[in-house]
Amino acid sequence: MRAANTRPSLSEEARQAMAQVDGSRLIGMQRTLASFGGREDGGVAREALTATEREARRWLIQQVSGPRYSWHVDAAANLFLRRAGTDDSLPPVMTGSHIDTQPVGGWLDGAYGVIAGLEALLALDSAGIDTRHPIELAIWTNEEGSRFSPGAMGSSAFAEPASLAAFLGSTDASGVRFETERDATVAATPEALNVPLGRPVRAYLEAHIEQGPILEVSGCKLGIVTGIQGVRWFEITVCGSSAHAGTTPLDDRRDALMTAARMVARIGDRAASLEDPALRVTVGRFDTAPGAINTVADRVTFTIDLRHPEEARLAAFEHHIREIVAQGTGRCTAEVRRLMQRTPTVFADEVVSIVEAAVATSGEPSYRLVSGAFHDAMHLADVCPTGMLFVPSHRGISHNAAENTDETDLIAGARILAAVLTELAC
Ligand SMILES: [Zn+2]
């Protein structure tokens, strides 16, 4: 971690860009974007690569104009609004997020990072600043993963182009292929020139709502995100023997459900006993077979979603899980399978320290935190120096029509974003 006295001071251009952020323009654009798929209850229904999302993309590209700007799209339908640099051969500084939502999402998840980035570009225009590096606003495809699985397709394909091939055949609930909707979405913005996946990027900074309660509780408007916690997913299968509920004595059973239930309770107790505020352990699925009221269960499968910012703690808790399952089988048998793992993301010190300098200049109180949720920035961190900036979420609510953030906080975040992008691009 950097000492406070090594923090860089902000350039004059970055201060000017910060000063030119127009709060009412930002909020106006944010509300207009929310009207694409907007619902009476304040929520937004704008799933990935739908006609509604395509209309929103068309509106977005119309918000920038003039000789500095061009539009680009890649094979994952990631859309880029590019503001030229004075040396346009340099790799771009990028910002952005996603505009797709859950089936019923809030008005800010993803959308805020896109609109804050757009406002940063317009602030640079107002300040008359030319940056050395180009700056690109990225609209990443299908972050949510609710219509097409997996999520974060656009940013992960950008970071690892070979992964796109496996996404093309993904289908939504009505059998429509990702590839079909990708093509329609690319065709909806004919102004956009094709660019390859996996281009070099100078640095990436994504603004996002926190989607959790930490900033609100802290009383700080700005969250300096130092990384994204890691995750491991497990599936535990317990096998017993089905038997008649009326005739089989309790001590003669191989009851998979009772055995699995005790395992789940012990895993929960172990997690609580560690008193680690950063540990997250979730049993989200518990399937039982044959699932009859009068038959002892012979097969139970349950899942564990394990998260922590430190890899060593993830490994340690995986050891606890394996130990508890191995010791708790009784007359049944059990197997632990790790389905997925993602190591914690540590954001670049270079980007984090510039965000800190910008926050210090703005005079707003800030808080350092690790993101509990995944974001497009996680994939960008694999290819370039990356950071994130959070603004508070009312009561931590997200993926919900009630999702909200104070306008003053949205504006404060956009000011920081404009300053940091300028600093990185000058
Ligand atoms: Zn998001």
Image (spheres, rainbow, N blue to C red):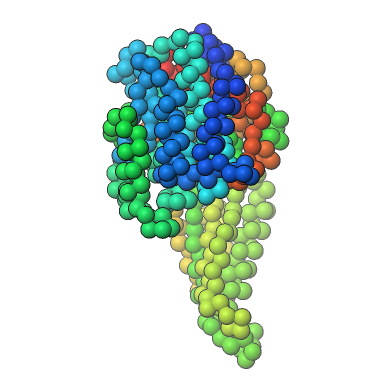
Res 304 quadrant in image: bottom right
Tell which residue pokes out farthest to the bottom in this image. Answer: 247
92 or 136: nearer the viewer: 136
**Marker count (numbered):** 0
Quarter of the picture holding the C terminus: top left
Give the residue drawn at x 54%, y 69%. Answer: 287
Quarter of the picture holding the N terminus: top right
What is the x, y in percent for residue 240? 52, 78
What is the x, y in percent for residue 30? 55, 30
Give the residue drawn at x 51%, y 29%. Answer: 115
Q: Is residue 26 above or below residue 46?
A: above
Asked if residue 140 lies left or right of residue 208, the reply is: left
Q: Is residue 296 above or below residue 306?
A: below
Give the residue drawn at x 62%, y 91%. Answer: 247
Asked if residue 292 lies left or right of residue 165, the reply is: right
Q: Is residue 327 above or below residue 348?
A: below
What is the x, y in percent for residue 269? 66, 58
415 or 229: nearer the viewer: 415
